Image (cartoon, rainbow, N blue to C red):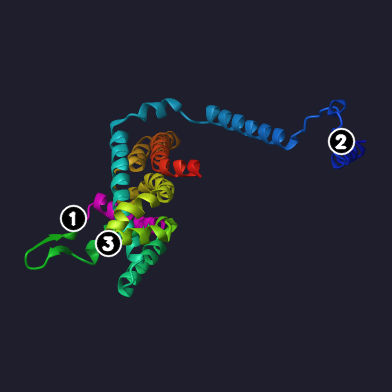
């Protein structure tokens, strides 16, 4: 019946006649059974997880008690501080290395390539341990004959974590920045050269501002990841939020409760950073939006 109706409509359309009145056909909504089953499964899983955590062997009052404990707050502050400084170090190194990758000097180019290869190949935890035990290789650091310091005094857990995470991050950030620079049309470089700009001026005033729209989303994701990577610093006794909560549950044996304390503060920090990332991306995407509307 439906095939015959479609055939009549097609014939009248070819003959240039008025289309047949569709009111005679019953409108039947399409059933999305897969969606219904999927939604029901998700809701059932959410309810099951909620009941499991609500009635499990978890003392939620202990979690609430330690949410704002002084040790946890200090650890949270150290986590944010380490993440920000390590990310700034990583971005600074990444921009320099990305520019080095475009150099026509083979030594500079291969040095940047070797840096990216080396620090992406070595696990982050291993890098932190290497920096923390640097005194076994270099007992002193400084200018020979002028002033030197004992490496064991300089390479504190904070410094080792900052160098390990920041330098490691620089290898990944350099590839993100390089991809952003490659996304800018070659005509922009030529236009900058035509008006008398040198390469550094062109990068700072023309190329990088345009590349930021491509660079920012992955950099924002890397920053959020850095907040979580700071938990590795607990291995070298840096007092971040994971180290602080673990010290507490070593004493009171409330492991799961204190882990939820750490998870709560990670969620808060990541949520704030995600909102900031959205605002920054919108700011740098304004020009692209106007260009699309003009076309």
Crowd around label 2: few <14 · some 14–19 · many ≥20 (10 Å): few
The residue pinned by badge 3 equals: 198
Eyeballing the image, is 257 above or below 86? above
**Which numbered marker is on residue 27?**
none
Tell which circle, 3 or 2, labels the residue nearer the N-terminal end: 2
- Taking the spot 10% from the left edge, 68% from the top edge, the residue there is 144
| Residues at marks 3 and 2 touching, judged by CB atoms closer than 8 Å | no
* Image quarter of the N terminus: top right
Label 3 residue SS: loop
Tell which circle, 3 or 1, labels the residue nearer the N-terminal end: 1
Res 266 → quadrant = top left
The residue pinned by badge 2 equals: 17
Q: Nearer the viewer, mark 3 or mark 2?
A: 2
Farthest residue to the front: give it: 16
Magenta residues, start to end: 154-178
- Taking the spot 32% from the left edge, 61% from the top edge, the residue there is 194
- Taking the spot 34% from the left edge, 57% from the top edge, the residue there is 170
- Taking the spot 32% from the left edge, 65% from the top edge, the residue there is 100
Q: Is residue 43 left or right of residue 15?
A: left
Percent of width and height locating residue 186? 41, 61
Q: Is residue 119 left or right of residue 59?
A: left
Label 1 residue SS: helix
Res 146 → quadrant = bottom left
Q: 127 and 239: which one is in front?
A: 127
Q: How far is the residue under mark 2 from the one under mark 1? A: 89 Å
Q: Is residue 185 visible?
A: yes
Q: Nearer the viewer, mark 3 or mark 1?
A: 3
Label 2 residue SS: loop
Percent of width and height locating residue 9? 87, 37
The residue pinned by badge 1 equals: 154
Per the image, is 173 magenta?
Answer: yes
| Residues at marks 2 and 1 touching, judged by CB atoms closer than 8 Å | no
């Amino acid at each position: 019946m439906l095939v015959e109706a479609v055939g009549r409509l097609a014939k009248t359309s070819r003959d240039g006649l008025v289309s047949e009145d569709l009111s005679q056909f019953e409108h039947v909504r399409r059933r999305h059974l897969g969606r219904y089953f999927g939604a029901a499964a998700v809701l059932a899983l959410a309810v099951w997880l909620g009941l499991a955590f609500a009635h499990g062997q978890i003392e939620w009052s202990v979690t609430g008690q330690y949410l704002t404990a002084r040790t946890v707050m200090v650890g949270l502050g150290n986590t944010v501080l380490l993440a920000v400084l390590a990310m700034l170090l990583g971005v600074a190194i990444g921009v320099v290395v990305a520019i080095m990758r475009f150099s026509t000097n083979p030594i500079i180019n291969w040095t940047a390539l070797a840096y990216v290869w080396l620090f992406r190949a070595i696990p982050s935890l291993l890098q932190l341990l290497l920096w923390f035990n640097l005194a076994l290789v270099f007992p002193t650091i400084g200018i020979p004959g002028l002033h030197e310091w004992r490496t064991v005094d300089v390479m504190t857990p904070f410094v080792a974590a900052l160098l390990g995470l920041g330098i490691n991050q620089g290898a990944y950030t350099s590839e993100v920045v390089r991809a952003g620079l490659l996304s800018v049309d070659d005509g922009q470089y030529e236009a900058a050269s035509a008006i008398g700009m040198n390469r550094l001026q062109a990068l700072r005033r023309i190329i990088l501002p345009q590349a930021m729209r491509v660079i920012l989303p992955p950099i924002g994701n890397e920053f959020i990841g850095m907040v979580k990577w700071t938990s590795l610093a607990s291995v070298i006794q840096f007092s971040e939020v994971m180290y602080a909560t673990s010290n507490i549950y070593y004493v009171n044996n409330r492991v799961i409760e204190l882990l939820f304390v750490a998870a709560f503060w990670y969620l808060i920090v990541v949520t704030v950073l995600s909102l900031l990332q959205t605002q920054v991306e919108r700011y740098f995407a304004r020009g692209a939006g106007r260009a699309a509307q003009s076309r």
